[in-house]
Image: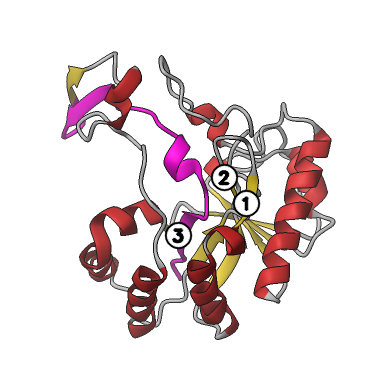
Amino acid sequence: MMRVRIDDIGSSTKWYNQHGKKLFCWKGIPYFYFPFSNVGFFKRMPLFRKWGVYDELTQSEWGKILCIFKKHSIIPIIAITATWVDKDNNLIPFPEKFPGEASILKQAFLSGDIMIANHGLTHCVVGKHLPKFWKSNRKYHREFWGWLPQNLHEEHIKESQKILENYFEKPISIFVPPGNIWSKKTYKVLKKTNITKVIANRYMIDSNEKMEGISFFNDKEDWNFHDRELKLYGESWLNKLISLYGL
């Protein structure tokens, strides 16, 4: 059965991950190349913006979205980043930053209408997450690179689990690595938590080692999107896609 997953809830990546689109294609054929799409304000212009700034979903918007899922008997996986990283590198826990949103998701989780997944503590490399004037900062909006120290993996996994499990009052058993990047260092820490499943489109970036006690699920056949689509395109987009997928 196809899994439905929504990523980036609570993540400041939606504000600070700013990069542009250089190559434009039509039916797979390139027709326009703009090399300056990552320079200055171009990366925030609708024409060139590939990611860029958008707001968090509100409690009211979640209410409507959850009603649609329930109507179609869909139990989505909601991948939450445990803290919002601000411009001064402060980490603000999800329930503190977005209390209304957190409350409605908690109610849905405890009622069995959604599943909650750990989507990292920060989603980014803290201190390198702010937009760059001359280039994309996308690389630094992946939290669990293999070149980061083991103690960072340890701290981020354990602290994110602590925040999410304390608030949602149930074990969190699913891990969705931000940007699908995770490593052997990440796995070593996951083994010490309640995580039993990793869902991503790739295995560990630096190892093919078989995991013990944790199952890997490739998400190629799943329907995965971000809260970005819901924020920008709304309920009509969601209903259209549900109909298209026959869910």
Disc 1 vs disc 3: which is toward the camera? 1
The numbered mark at residue 178 is 2
* CA neighbours of label 3 inside 10 A, class few (<14), some (14 to 19), many (20+): many
Q: In which quarter of the image is residue 123?
A: top right
The kind of residue on which mark 2 rests is Pro
Disc 2 vs disc 1: which is toward the camera? 1
- Percent x, y of residue 44: 30, 31
Mark 2 and mark 3 lie on one chain; the one further toward the N terminus is 3
Q: Quadrant of residue 34?
A: top left
- Percent x, y of residue 113: 49, 81
At x 46%, y 21%, the residue is 132
In-image side of 180 versus 66 (left or right): right
The kind of residue on which mark 3 rests is Ile
Say what secondary structure mark 3 lies in. strand
- Percent x, y of residue 179: 53, 41
The numbered mark at residue 6 is 3
The numbered mark at residue 222 is none
Residues rendered magenta in the picture: 1-29
Disc 2 versus disc 1: distance between alpha carbons? 18 Å
- Up the image or down, 111 lies above or below 36; here it is below
Q: Mark 1 points at which residue?
A: 92
Disc 2 versus disc 3: distance between alpha carbons? 12 Å
- Up the image or down, 196 lies above or below 7; here it is below
In magenta stretch: residue 20: yes
In-image side of 242 versus 29 (left or right): right
Say what secondary structure mark 2 lies in. helix
The kind of residue on which mark 1 rests is Ile
Say what secondary structure mark 1 lies in. strand
At x 70%, y 76%, the residue is 169
Residue 16 or 142: which is nearer the viewer? 16
